[in-house]
Amino acid sequence: MASSKVLIVTGASRGIGAAIARQAGREGYAVAVNYVRDREAALKVCEDIRAWGSRALPVQADVSREAEVVRLFETADAELGPLSALVNNAATTGRRCLIEDVDEETLHRVLALNVAGYFLCAREALKRLSTQRGGQGGVVVNVSSVAALLGNAFDWVHYGASKGAIDTFTRGLALEGAPHGVRCNAVRPGMVRTEINPEDRIASIAPTIPLGRVAEAPEIAEAVLWLLSDKASYCTGTIMNVSGGR
């Protein structure tokens, strides 16, 4: 299968990011699989993508750091070709704690990765995609969370707050990106069976979800791939809940 579109997925070695990267590979994208530490997991995602006949490139970068973001995009440019789309997915919850117990290090790390990282990656994507800068236009999809609406009290309010910022950022990027031929949308997953969610948390929350279960990562990936596609050509500034009714 020839890969005609180039996609960068941040935090793509596991969980939702890995599911998005794999589904994109199935649909013919050449995928830059970004990771921070787990190279072996990123290589496995790349192996799966190549098995479907698409190109894949593992790229190590901490997207909370500006120089590493620039290197990620420059590496994808050189190895895969002109960018078509970006999925901002890399994020961290930080430690589980009450607001009264939150510490400076947790706040700085969560906001640096979950908010600043999305901004920096979107900046580099917009430079490349903009029709005003010689690009062909394109799409950015931000992975937010239903935590932005629910607050995540008693667990990760800092994480929920960071995702609330991403909802606002999605709207802002959609408005600024429109004259550049760039659409920006977001997906708000509910609880998903990934390494982020410990089993005790899944067990306590799953019965409260209207659909009666947590999501699997490929279910979130399907929504992201739809927003990346031409089927969503009239969607920008849209935030799609994929949360089982929460």
Image (cartoon, rainbow, N blue to C red):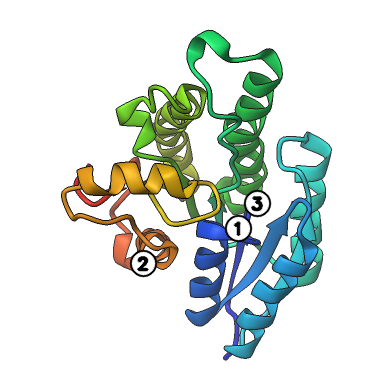
Q: Marks 2 and 1: which is nearer the front?
A: 1
Kind of residue indicated by mark 3: Arg
Is 138 on the left-hand or right-hand side of 80? left
- Residue under circle 3? 128
Question: What element does badge 3 sit on?
Answer: helix
- The residue depicted at 38 percent of the width and 48 percent of the height is 202
Q: Position of residue 132 (x, y in %)?
A: 57, 46
Q: Residues within 10 Å of mark 1 (few under 14, many from 20)?
A: many
The residue under label 1 is: 9
In the figure, is residue 171 to the left or right of 126? left
The quarter of the picture where the C terminus appears is top left
Q: Please name whichever residue, 42 or 210, is drawn nearer the observer in this view of the structure.
A: 210
Placement of the N terminus among the 4 image quadrants: bottom right
Do callouts 3 and 1 mark residues in contact (Cβ within 8 Å)?
no
Mark 2: secondary structure: helix
Tag on residue 39? none
The quarter of the picture where residue 103 lies is: top right
Of the residues under marks 3 and 1, which one precedes in the sequence?
1
Q: In percent of the image, x 52 and y 8: which residue is there?
A: 100
Which residue in the rendered view is the most extreme toward the left?
A: 210
Eye-nearest disc, 3 or 1 = 1
Q: Mark 2 or mark 1: which comes first in sequence? A: 1
Do residues under tags 3 and 2 come within 8 Å of each other at their CB atoms? no
Counting from the top left corner in percent of width and height, residue 120 is at 66, 36
Q: Few, some or many C-alpha atoms within 10 Å of disc 3 (few <14, some 14-19, many ≥20)?
A: many
For disc 2, the marked residue is: 230
Q: CA distance from mark 2 to mark 1?
A: 18 Å
Q: Which amino acid, by three-letter code, is at mark 1?
A: Val
Q: Nearer the viewer, residue 233 or 35?
A: 35
User: Image height check: is 236 above or below 60?
Assistant: above
